[in-house]
Amino acid sequence: MSENLTQLSARKGLKENLFEQMVQAKGDPIRLKDLSKEYKVGEANIYGASTAYDFIQGDNANKKAYVCNGSSCLCAGTQEKVNQQLLEKFDQQQIGHVTCLGRCHENASFQLNGENYSGDDINQLDAIIKNSKQSDENYHVECRLPQPLLTEAIEDTAGYYQLFSKVTGQHNRQELLQQVVDSGLRGRGGAGFPTGFKWQSCANEIAEEKYIVCNADEGDPGAFSDRYLLEERPHAVLFGMLMAGYLSGAQWGVLYIRDEYPDSVSQIQIAIDEFEKLSLLDDLKTDSDFEFQFKIVRGAGAYICGEETALLRSIEGQRPMVSVRPPFPTVKGLFGKPTILNNVETFAAIHWILENSAEKFAAIGNGRSTGSKLLSLDSCFKRPGIYEVAMGEPLANIIEQAGGFVKAIKALHIGGPLGGLIPIEKIADLTIDFESFAEQGFLLGHGSIIGLPKSYDIADYVHHLFEFTEVESCGKCFPCRIGSVRGKEMFADALAGKHLLEKTLLDDLLDTMEQGSLCALGGGVPLPVKNALQYFMPEMQHLFSQPSVQTIHVREA
Ligand SMILES: Cc1cc2nc3c(=O)[nH]c(=O)nc-3n(C[C@H](O)[C@H](O)[C@H](O)COP(=O)(O)O)c2cc1C
Ligand code: SF4
């Protein structure tokens, strides 16, 4: 992170946002040069930043169609056919790739002219091309609690926001902050950080300018629960951000939404327009000086922008690289100002907490993981979709409710590419909470569940995970930047029969990545690889060299 670049970008801030200008420039060198003069930022900085994104410039930018190459579509084996059918209509140069469109519930996912499609849509290409036919996307939304916390429909938007005036009229800011603390809500973006603590920390900072940022970059292949909330429950997300703004003294609520989710962008924009029509804030201004504005910033295709510090640098128009913490975003965040950054689902939980009480929320779960959690079930389940479950619910119950599997599965990959690979026989040991997954050597993460079919080669899957990390690494630290490449090469060579894997070398590589990486991308990918080695070694044994007789070097006296 460059403090200078942050300050230079801050001069125009969100209103004439450098990142948005850069995206619009689409890599045009003349426009990028102009931007460098306008924002007084070095040409190399602007150029370097714009090359970090798949959809701004480079081999994969400006394609007519994009084929999903995410883990779920890969496991479902649908993409070869999608590619072939697109090739009947378009040249190879017009087709790019994209890592996960969040259509994991039916796979065969692709994007055409900026719209997402999946399932049977590929068989209706002519209609899509002729009439820009909408996708027939369909997925189950089921709740396993007596009363839904996140999946309940919001029928009356104005009535929904009345809670804001009600609670701010009845309680002071500190009392409301305490409710967020007492609820035990922990961040749903993967790390499970206590939300109340984060909000309090930002509220404690004395600054004229503060920001609320919603992390809607849901890049984990297999996850689509944030997409569900953004598209189906957008006011729940906005309400949480509004409340965070009020309690911490922020003026802006920025939603950083990934470019791969065009419908999320449009649904959130509709919701912001509806919110603004309610003029709720005008009433509030009379007895407090609270002003709050929402803004959508649309990503441009870079998984690392889901990591919070990279996301903030992205909005500033810097290259999205991970920053060392501290300082934490609550102290020095967007444009160097105190910032609360939370996941979509975290913000969406706030309305229920304030309406029903922190105690009721805390009473759901196991005491340490509280409230409910959304799970994204992919097409390996008979009833794929979004499942809302109480924290602490056995994983086996959810699989049963989803009707079991459509085909023989050997493992579940839960929590995205950095989450654990859970062999089928371990399912019975797990409950949906942060603790159970950690104790069993896995990770709940964002709660995405991908089924790995029995027929899918486990070494191929490990190769895919290393390749994903290689492509998406921000490059800041060498254990991840180089380690992911070496890991991919090792498995590629072994699979091609060129070079057997050496267990000691692989173990060293995994330990180096795990311990030496700056963030959870390089630090996290060893987990599923280690799970594969622990539970599926017999399947991979033929790819490993046999342990050689140890040579003992005796130093001569
Ligand atoms: C490589 C990487 C990718 C991440 N992607 C996301 C993401 O897509 N969405 C998200 O909310 N958090 C993501 N995170 C976690 C964020 O850095 C951050 O912890 C989270 O957004 C904080 O919000 P929460 O406290 O509400 O969970 C990612 C972290 C890493 C290391
Ligand atoms: S672990 Fe990877 S993504 Fe994270 S800071 Fe290091 S190079 Fe960047």
Image (spheres, rainbow, N blue to C red):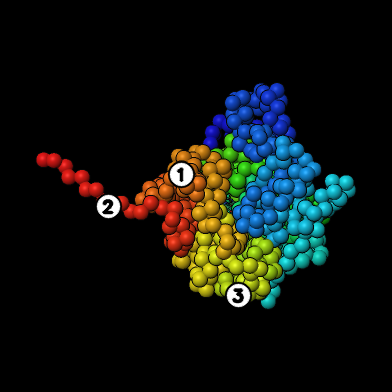
Three-letter code, disc 2: Val
Q: Position of residue 10 (x, y in %)?
A: 63, 35
Instruction: From the viewer's perspective, tell me whether residue 263 is left or right of residue 527.
Output: right
For ligand 2, tell me if the residue under mark 1 lies within 8 Å.
Answer: no
Q: Give the quarter of the image for residue 483.
A: top left
Residue sitting nearer the eye, 177 or 431: 431
Q: Position of residue 87 (x, y in %)?
A: 75, 43
Q: Earlier in the sequence, mark 1 or mark 3?
A: 3
Taking the image as drawn, is residue 416 in sight?
A: yes
Residue that carries the numbered disc 2 in the rendered image = 549
Residue that carries the numbered disc 1 in the rendered image = 498
Q: Residues within 10 Å of mark 1 (few under 14, many from 20)?
A: few
Residue 397 - label = 3
Q: Are marks 1 and 2 in contact (CB under 8 Å)?
A: no
Q: Secondary structure at mark 1?
A: loop
Instruction: From the viewer's perspective, tell me whether residue 130 is left or right of residue 30.
Output: right
Q: Residue at 65% of width from left, 56% of height from top?
A: 77
Instruction: From the viewer's perspective, tell me whether residue 294 is left or right of residue 472.
Output: right
Q: Residue at 52% of width from left, 73% of height from top?
A: 428
Q: Residue at 74% of width from left, 60% of height from top?
A: 233
**Which mark is nearer the camera, 1 or 3?**
1
Three-letter code, disc 1: Lys
Q: Give the quarter of the image for residue 230.
A: bottom right
Instruction: From the viewer's perspective, tell me whether residue 136 is left or right of residue 259.
Output: right
Q: What separation in Å lies between label 1 and label 2 (alpha carbons)? A: 22 Å
Q: Earlier in the sequence, mark 3 or mark 2?
A: 3
